[in-house]
């Protein structure tokens, strides 16, 4: 098995755990946080910042999300989902650009 | 950290482990290390495995180069905890702190090889804009970087775009320079497992 497959396979395990593993937030809630799309209003500020400007997250963002009735465990899962989701989109975008540049549909098979 | 469960919600065995580590090292465990102990089946176990594979698994990039990429990506994200941690780790790995500082201050004039510079430039764009194109990749390839090395760099980038986001969202406590150095020695000895 090529080396890069191990890195990507390990990443895929992480994505699957976060999206479908046992958790307190529903898989639908986690999927929305992961894709930063269709997130309900009280959570939107927090999840949007985790995805696009994480250094701007504040205590107030967490307070607003908690006030909507989400538990700390649910928030833990949704913040992790948002972070893994954004990083995954970057990883996929980079691999797709590389495949295009090398004229290979699937760079993991290049070697 | 901003969620109380991440400060005090660990299982008794984990709390005992934290206390033992503190006793032997004389330092509290950094928040980056604590986080992966919280419900490890949800995030920590798989995250550690991926991060270790990206940072310490087989690659044509040295450990120092990959730690520099981690510091560079974290710097673009303004993730203070991760910049501190991986600046210290890259500096120790290269045995050259000035080189790492120069890259973070101005990539274009820093004393690094063209291939590494082109790779960091591409990772910076991907991290800033969330996307890159085939042209960006051709620029890296023409600097002498192999497709495999680009894939390896993208894995480092993915790992630290995840960790940095969590550091800032959960509010990891910054460490003193001495404690960042101690953490760096640990990461170079043991990795991310």
Image (cartoon, coloured by chain):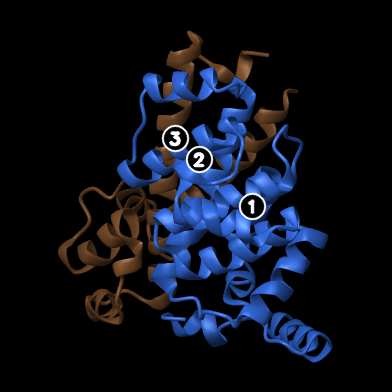
Chain colours: A brown, B blue
Query: Which residue does the image show at 23% across and 81% down from the upper left?
Result: A67
Query: Which residue position is annotated with label 2?
Result: B120
Q: State if disc 2 and disc 3 touch (CB < 8 Å).
A: yes
Classify 10 Å Cα crowding around label 2: few (below 14), some (14-19), many (20 and above). many
Query: Which residue position is annotated with label 3?
Result: B122
Query: Which residue position is annotated with label 1?
Result: B67
Instruction: Residue B126: name its quadrant.
Output: top left
Q: Is residue B193 visible in this depiction of the protein?
A: no
Sequence-wise first label, 1 or 3: 1
Q: Left or right: A11 with respect to B55?
A: left
Secondary structure of the residue carrying numbered label 1: helix
Query: Which residue does the image show at 68% across and 81% down from the upper left?
Result: B178
Query: Which residue does the image show at 33% across and 54% down from the upper left?
Result: A51
Classify 10 Å Cα crowding around label 1: few (below 14), some (14-19), many (20 and above). many
Sequence-wise first label, 1 or 2: 1
Q: Is residue B16 visible in this depiction of the protein?
A: yes
Secondary structure of the residue carrying numbered label 2: helix
Secondary structure of the residue carrying numbered label 3: helix
Q: Which quadrant: the C terminus of chain B?
A: bottom right
Residue B142's spot in the image, x, y percent? 52, 18
Q: CA distance from mark 1 to mark 2?
A: 12 Å
Marks 3 and 2 on same chain: yes
Furthest residue to the left? Answer: A41
């Amino acid at each position: 098995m090529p080396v890069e497959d191990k890195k990507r396979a390990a990443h895929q395990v992480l994505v699957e755990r976060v999206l479908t593993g046992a958790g307190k937030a529903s898989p639908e809630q986690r999927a929305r946080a992961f894709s930063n799309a269709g997130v309900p209003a009280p959570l939107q500020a927090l999840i949007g910042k985790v995805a696009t400007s994480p250094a701007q997250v504040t205590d107030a963002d967490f307070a607003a999300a908690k006030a909507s009735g989400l538990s700390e465990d649910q928030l833990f899962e949704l913040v992790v989902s948002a972070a893994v989701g954004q990083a995954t989109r970057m990883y996929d975008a980079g691999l797709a650009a590389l495949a295009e540049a090398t004229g290979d549909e699937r760079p993991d098979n290049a070697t | 950290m901003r969620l109380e469960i991440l400060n005090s919600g660990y299982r008794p065995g984990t709390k005992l482990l934290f206390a033992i580590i503190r006793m032997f090292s004389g330092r509290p465990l950094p928040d980056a290390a604590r986080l992966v102990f919280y419900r490890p089946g949800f995030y920590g176990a798989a995250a550690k495995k991926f991060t270790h594979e990206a940072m310490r698994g087989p690659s044509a990039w040295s450990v120092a180069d990959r730690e520099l990429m981690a510091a560079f990506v974290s710097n673009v994200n303004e993730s203070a905890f991760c910049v501190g941690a991986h600046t210290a780790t890259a500096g120790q790995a290269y045995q050259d702190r000035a080189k790492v500082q120069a890259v973070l201050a101005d990539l274009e004039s820093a004393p690094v090889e063209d291939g590494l510079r082109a790779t960091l430039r591409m990772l910076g764009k991907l991290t800033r804009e969330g996307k890159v194109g085939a042209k960006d990749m051709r620029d890296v390839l023409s600097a002498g970087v192999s497709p495999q090395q680009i894939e390896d760099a993208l894995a480092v980038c993915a790992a630290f775009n995840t960790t940095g986001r969590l550091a800032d969202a959960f509010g990891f406590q910054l460490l003193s320079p001495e404690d960042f150095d101690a953490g760096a020695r640990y990461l170079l000895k043991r990795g991310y497992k």
